[in-house]
Image: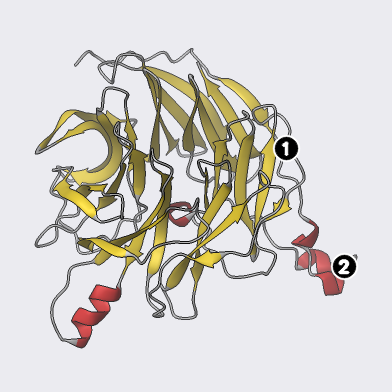
C-alpha cells in the first residue's frame, strides 16, 4: 500500500452552515408566548440522517421531541425547506448517534423513514417505519416492521433497498437472550434479525434470524453488493468475549446466505462500546469498511478491505481521538469521514481515495465548539459529500473535491 498523502492546506468547500428551521411545536402549546413556555421549549436533538433523491434534492430527517421532521434542500444544503412532520401522532423516538432515524428511497420513488420507538422498560424498543407516496410531502401512519411484540430489545435498526427493489430492515433483537434466561442457559450478547418488504415498504414479511451473539448497542452497517443483494456488518461477540465484527449476505427472503467473521482485532471486553462500523461496496465488488476496536491496548478507528478470512490494507484512521467514522463510494472515488476532539473543538476530517484505497489525500472539513452528531458520508452520482449536524451551526453539508 502506498503511503498516506497528507494535504493539510487542502480544505473541502463548505456548501452550507445553516441553522435548523424551528418547528411550530417546539414550545409547550399550553404556555405559548409565556416565559414558562420558553423555558419548556424542547431542545433540538442532533441525531439525523440525509440522502439525495433521484431528482438531486437532499432530504434530511431529524428528531424533535416526540416527532420526526423531514427537511428538503434543492441546492445541496444552502437552504432548507420548512419541516414536514413524519409521524402525525407523537411517540417516543430514539435519537442518539448509534440509534438515529434513517432515510432511504423505494425503487418506485417512495420515501422511507425508519426509527426505533423506546418502550416503557429500559433498553427495549420496536422498529418503526413510515412511507411517503408523494416525495415526502406527507406520510402514512407508521408501522412496526416485526411480528414479535415482546417488550424487549428490537433496536438499532438499519434499512437498505436491494438491487431488485426489495426493502430490507435489520436490527438487534433480544428474544433469544430472553428465552435463554428463562431456560437458565448461557447466551452471549443479543441477535441480529431481519425482515423484507416486496411492496416498497408498505408491509413486511415475518422476520428471520440472521445470527446469534451480536453486540448489544452498536449500530449496524448495510450496503448493496454488486449482484444487488444486501450486506450487513455488525459488531459480534465471538466466543468467549471477543467483540470483533461479522458480515452477512442476505437472501431475497432476508435469511442469511452466509455469515463470516470480518475483523480480527480480538478485542476481549465484557461490555458494549456503542461504536458501530460502516460499509461500502466498490463497483469491482471490493468491500471497504471502517470500524472502531481496541488493538494492542489502544482504542482506534481502522480502515480495511474485507475479504473472506482476513483483511487487506488495514490501517489506522486519524489520531488517538478519532471516532464515528463513515464511508461512501461514488464510482471509483471513496471517502472516509470522521470526527476528532482536539481538546477544545471537535474537528471533522475526511480522506479521499481515487485508487481503491491504495492511497488517500486528507481534507480538513470543519469544526464545532458545541455538541455534534455522528457525521455521515453520502454518495450522489459521481460526487461525494459529508453531512454533519452540530449544536451551534445546524445542518452542514460539505462537497468533497
Q: Which residue is mark 1?
A: 80
| Image mark for residue 235 | none
Are there few (<14), some (14-19), or many (20+) residues within 10 Å of tag 2?
some
Q: Is residue 317 above or below residue 353?
A: below
Residue at x 43% of width, y 43% of height: 165
Residue at x 43% of width, y 61% of height: 204
Front residue of 30 and 76: 76
Where residue 292 sits, quadrant-wise, is top left
Q: Is residue 74 left or right of residue 390?
A: right
Residue at x 15% of width, y 44% of height: 265
Residue 132: x, y in percent? 63, 51
Helix, strand or loop under label 1: loop
Farthest residue, direction right = 33
Helix, strand or loop under label 2: loop
Are there few (<14), some (14-19), or many (20+) residues within 10 Å of tag 1?
many
Work out which quarter of the rendered image holds the N terminus and state it: top left
Q: CA distance from mark 2 to mark 1?
A: 25 Å
Where residue 225 sits, quadrant-wise, is top left
Foreground mark, 2 or 1, reads: 1
Q: Is residue 289 left or right of residue 32?
A: left
Q: Which residue is mark 2?
A: 32
Q: Is residue 110 left or right of residue 264?
A: right
Report the coloring of the rendering. Answer: secondary structure
Q: Is residue 244 visible?
A: no
Residue 290: x, y in percent? 30, 37
Front residue of 376 and 55: 55
How many tags in the picture? 2
Residue 51: x, y in percent? 55, 38
Residue 266: x, y in percent? 13, 48
Q: Is residue 247 visible?
A: yes
Among numbered discs 2 and 1, the one appearing first in the sequence = 2
Amino acid at each position: 500500500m502506498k503511503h498516506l498523502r497528507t494535504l493539510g492546506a487542502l480544505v473541502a468547500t463548505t456548501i452550507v452552515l445553516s441553522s435548523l428551521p424551528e418547528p411550530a411545536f417546539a414550545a409547550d402549546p399550553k404556555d405559548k408566548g409565556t416565559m414558562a413556555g420558553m423555558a419548556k421549549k424542547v431542545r433540538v436533538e442532533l441525531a439525523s440522517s440525509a440522502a439525495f433523491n433521484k431528482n438531486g434534492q437532499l432530504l434530511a430527517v431529524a428528531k424533535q421531541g416526540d416527532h420526526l421532521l423531514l427537511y428538503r434542500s434543492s441546492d445541496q444544503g444552502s437552504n432548507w425547506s420548512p419541516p414536514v412532520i413524519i409521524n402525525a401522532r407523537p411517540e417516543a423516538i430514539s435519537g442518539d448517534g448509534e440509534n438515529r432515524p434513517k432515510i432511504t428511497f423505494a425503487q418506485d420513488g417512495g420515501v422511507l423513514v425508519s426509527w426505533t420507538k423506546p418502550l416503557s422498560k429500559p433498553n427495549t424498543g420496536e422498529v418503526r417505519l413510515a412511507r411517503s407516496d408523494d416525495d415526502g410531502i406527507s406520510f402514512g401512519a407508521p408501522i412496526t416492521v416485526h411480528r414479535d411484540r415482546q417488550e424487549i430489545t428490537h433496536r438499532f435498526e438499519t434499512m437498505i433497498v436491494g438491487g431488485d427493489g426489495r426493502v430490507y430492515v435489520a436490527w438487534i433483537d433480544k428474544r433469544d437472550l430472553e428465552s435463554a434466561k428463562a431456560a437458565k442457559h448461557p447466551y452471549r450478547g443479543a441477535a441480529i434479525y431481519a425482515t423484507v418488504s416486496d411492496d416498497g415498504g408498505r408491509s413486511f414479511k415475518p422476520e428471520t434470524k440472521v445470527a446469534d451473539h451480536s453486540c448489544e448497542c452498536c449500530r449496524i452497517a448495510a450496503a448493496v453488493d454488486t449482484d444487488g443483494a444486501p450486506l450487513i456488518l455488525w459488531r459480534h461477540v465471538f466466543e468467549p468475549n471477543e467483540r470483533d465484527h461479522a458480515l452477512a449476505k442476505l437472501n431475497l427472503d432476508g435469511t442469511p446466505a452466509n455469515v463470516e467473521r470480518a475483523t480480527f482485532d480480538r478485542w476481549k471486553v465484557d461490555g458494549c462500546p456503542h461504536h458501530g462500523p460502516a460499509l461500502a461496496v466498490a463497483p469491482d465488488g471490493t468491500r471497504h469498511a471502517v470500524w472502531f476496536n481496541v488493538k494492542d491496548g489502544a482504542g482506534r478507528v481502522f480502515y480495511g478491505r474485507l475479504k473472506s478470512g482476513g483483511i487487506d490494507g488495514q490501517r489506522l484512521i486519524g489520531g488517538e481521538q478519532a471516532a464515528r467514522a463513515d464511508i461512501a463510494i461514488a464510482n471509483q472515488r471513496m471517502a472516509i469521514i470522521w470526527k476528532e476532539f482536539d481538546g477544545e473543538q471537535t474537528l471533522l476530517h475526511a480522506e479521499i481515495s481515487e485508487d481503491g484505497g491504495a492511497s488517500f489525500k486528507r481534507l480538513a472539513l470543519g469544526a464545532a465548539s458545541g455538541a455534534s452528531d455522528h457525521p455521515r458520508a453520502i454518495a450522489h452520482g459521481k460526487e461525494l459529500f459529508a453531512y454533519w449536524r452540530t449544536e451551534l451551526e445546524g445542518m452542514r453539508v460539505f462537497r468533497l473535491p
